[in-house]
Image: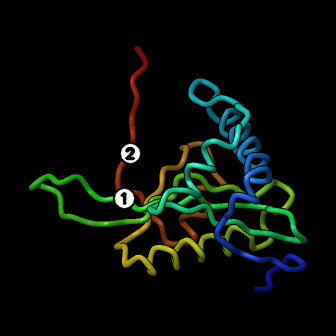
Amino acid sequence: MMSKMDFLEVNLATHDDIEQICRLYDEFYAYNAKLQPEYCNAAKESGKYPESVIADENADIIVAIENNIIVGFIHVREAKTPPYASVVPHSYAEIIDFIVTASCREKGVGSELMDAAREWGKARSLDYIELFVLTNAKEAYAFYQHYGFDTKSHTMRYAL
């Protein structure tokens, strides 16, 4: 698939991708820590987390690769609404983590990954895609709105 980048390939991650995924997770964690240092740490990813996702039959990491280098990924998993009488039951895709390395943003990588996540959910006959975004991640929020996401609820906190 061609994009604004030289050549971009989008695939499901494998065990061979763990090291590069960890590098991007480190960037992702640092970005979140900068946005909300009171709640997020700039941690180092050991590889255990992406390894567990790759092994999970209800989740995947979809990677974008340019010239044999992973330049972005989207972690998606299947979820279900709680079994309460007051909640309309749905099965849906949940975007857990999504990052494009800083040097590759605004080049179509995020769009390719989002399209792949949509296809992933459709292939599993899921009803919709849901995600959590930090309130001060303005670029991410605008990206999601561009893709038709709209706010259905807010998480609020009161510091004690």
Q: Secondary structure at mark 2?
A: loop
Q: Dividing the image into 4 quarters, which one contains the N terminus?
A: bottom right
Quarter of image, res 139: bottom right
Question: Is residue 107 or residue 14 the one in the foreground?
Answer: 14
- Image mark for residue 154: 2
Q: Tell me the kind of residue under disc 1.
A: Ala
- Image mark for residue 79: 1
In the picture shown, does residue 126 fall above or below 59?
below
Q: Residue at x 45, y 73 (%)?
A: 121
In the shown orientation, is residue 16 left or right of residue 52? Answer: right
Q: Residue at x 66, y 39 (%)?
A: 32
Question: Is residue 120 or residue 88 the one in the foreground?
Answer: 120
In the picture shown, does residue 12 fall above or below 86?
below
- Between label 1 and label 2, give the one nearer the viewer: 1
Q: Tell me the kind of residue under disc 2.
A: His
Residue extending farthest left = 85
In the picture shown, does residue 111 fall above or below 59?
below
